[in-house]
Image (cartoon, grey):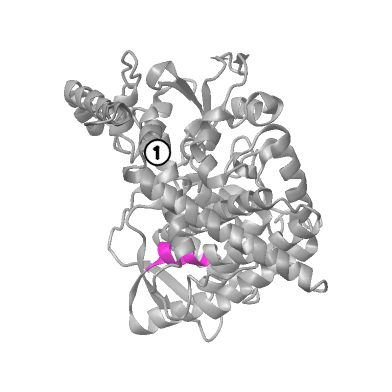
Amino acid sequence: MFQPEFLTSLLLFILPFFFIFLIKTSFSTQIRKNKKSSSVSSSPTTKFPKSYPLLGSSIAISANQEIFNQWATELLKDSPNGNILLHRPLGHLQFVTTDPANIQHILKNEFNLYPKGDFFRDTLTNFLGDGIFNADGDNWRFQRQISSHEFNTKSLRKFTETVVEDEIIDRLLPLLSEAASKNHVIDLQDILQRFAFDNVCKIAFGYDPATLSPSFPQPRSEFAEAFEIATQLNSERFHYIFPPFWKLKRALNIGSEKILREANATVREFATKVVREKRRELQEKSSLETEDLLSRILNSGHSDERFVTDMVISFILAGRDTTSAALIWFFLLVSRNPRVEEELVKELKEKPESLDYNDVKQVVYTHAAICETMRLYPPVPNDTKFAAADNYLPDGTFVKKGAGVTYFPYAMGRMEKLWGKDCMEFRPERWLEKEEENSSPSGGKLKFVGKDPYKYPVFQAGPRVCLGKDMAFLQMQKIVAGVMQKYRVVPAEKEFDPLFVSYMSSKMKGGFPVRIEKRMVASSEQ
């Protein structure tokens, strides 16, 4: 005989499938229509998604899940005020905006009124725990204070510089040299992800997973593979048509949630083990240099194992894919724009192969080109906060308590009203202007000019602005210099047109297959 508990679980398991089957059957025509109108090149007459009782606009959202950023961007372009309202299941609302004044309101002016919220924390708690990127309120402020102090130390910056330099010289460049000499096609996305993962683990843990090595390609370590799975499956929780469904799967320990439980456990067990070993090292060797972030946190008196583990996992997540996500699009855009490539090479050939913090201030065109890349292809294309109380935005929009408010860097970079009619062009010069030298009419050399962070919220803005921004630029500029001074990156496929997709950060679907060509250096100045 079946036990009542089993029958209840079976019923709970079957009902959502039946529910979703009815939805998909009833509205299959609607899904096909949404797919037809969801391409990036759709006309400016794109219709806002239809909303149904209980379901909201989940049918259209699900149909466009893989191209959500492109689809939502077209809707935002159609909107006269750059805002749209998406109806999520069970009456939940998601307000999406590209208005810099609204973004400043939620990220700075009314910061305490727009936390990450329970929905976000509940979705990621098994993975991130109470780490800084999954925290609100006093817990977040406490971690932010600790992190801000450590990130502003010169010694950590120097350590970061050394770690990145070693990874470039010992691993990245030899790999590119071999690919160039043998004319191999390599997946640059995979390589840069491995590069970033090694770097952030060494900076955060003082641990080298060596996922990028001279014997590449090779399988990732168990920790790296589990981290990849955990990142993707945790992200997919946000896209369910029927949100309680993933919780049901988790309770029954089936399907993707079973895989995710195992991946989360592997990540946490490994991170905890590293924390324990690091604490033992510090206790046994009082003179041990404390360069990595974990050592610094432990030495500052924070000994709670779970607290420290949560913090370090969050930092690995933040640094793992963001720089690699920016750089793959950078190298693609440069390959499509010979004029930009020429300017970059001209600037970089006058600099040492190893750029330090002082050098990166001088490569203004490189800095501009990276910023321009992230304007069009931000590593985190959208971000959502949840209103803790009823509130009005600067443009007069009423936000009900509990509603999600999403700001959208991906769409903002494609808005004419923000960036002009040439907004779809890759033009680093929009970040540069000439310095005046002794009031000379001809002007002087170029200088980098930043943009309003609420017009360009690629690194967030306000109290939660990215602490690792300067380190990220150092890493990206050092990689660009190391690669472009010696090699050209050429897409392996003609007319290569990858799909921009995003989980917790953006990627090229299917990777970035490239060939590496040795750069020809002129023997004399022309």
- Apparent side of residue 263 relative to residue 464 in the rendered image (left or right): left
Q: Position of residue 467 (x, y in %)?
A: 68, 49
Q: Name which quarter of the figure residue 268 lies in.
A: bottom right
Q: Nearer the viewer, residue 408 or 489?
A: 408
- Apparent side of residue 372 relative to residue 253 in the rendered image (left or right): right
Q: For residue 349, say whether it is visible.
A: no
Q: Secondary structure at mark 1?
A: helix
Q: Position of residue 272 (x, y in %)?
A: 60, 57
Find out whether residue 513 is within the magenta segment. no
Q: Nearer the viewer, residue 31 or 247?
A: 247
Which residue of the protein is positioned furthest toward the bottom in this rendering? 523
Q: Quadrant of the N terminus?
A: top left
Residue on which the image places disc 1: 250
Q: Position of residue 493 (x, y in %)?
A: 28, 64
Find the magenta span and give its range.
187-195
Q: Position of residue 414 (x, y in %)?
A: 46, 38
At 78% from the left and 68% from the top, the residue drawn is: 283
Q: Is residue 467 above or below residue 163?
A: above
Which residue of the protein is positioned furthest toward the front in this rendering? 1
How busy is the neighbourhood of tag 1: few (under 14 within 10 Å), some, or many (20 plus)? some
Q: Is residue 204 above or below residue 419?
A: below
Q: Nearer the viewer, residue 473 or 24?
A: 24
At 34% from the left and 45% from the top, the residue drawn is: 256
Q: Name which quarter of the figure residue 107 lies in.
A: top right
Name the dominant secondary structure of the magenta segment. helix
At 57% from the left and 78% from the top, the residue drawn is: 169
Q: Nearer the viewer, residue 41 or 427?
A: 41
Q: For residue 22, say whether it is visible.
A: yes
Q: How many discs appear?
A: 1
Q: Amino acid at mark 1?
A: Arg
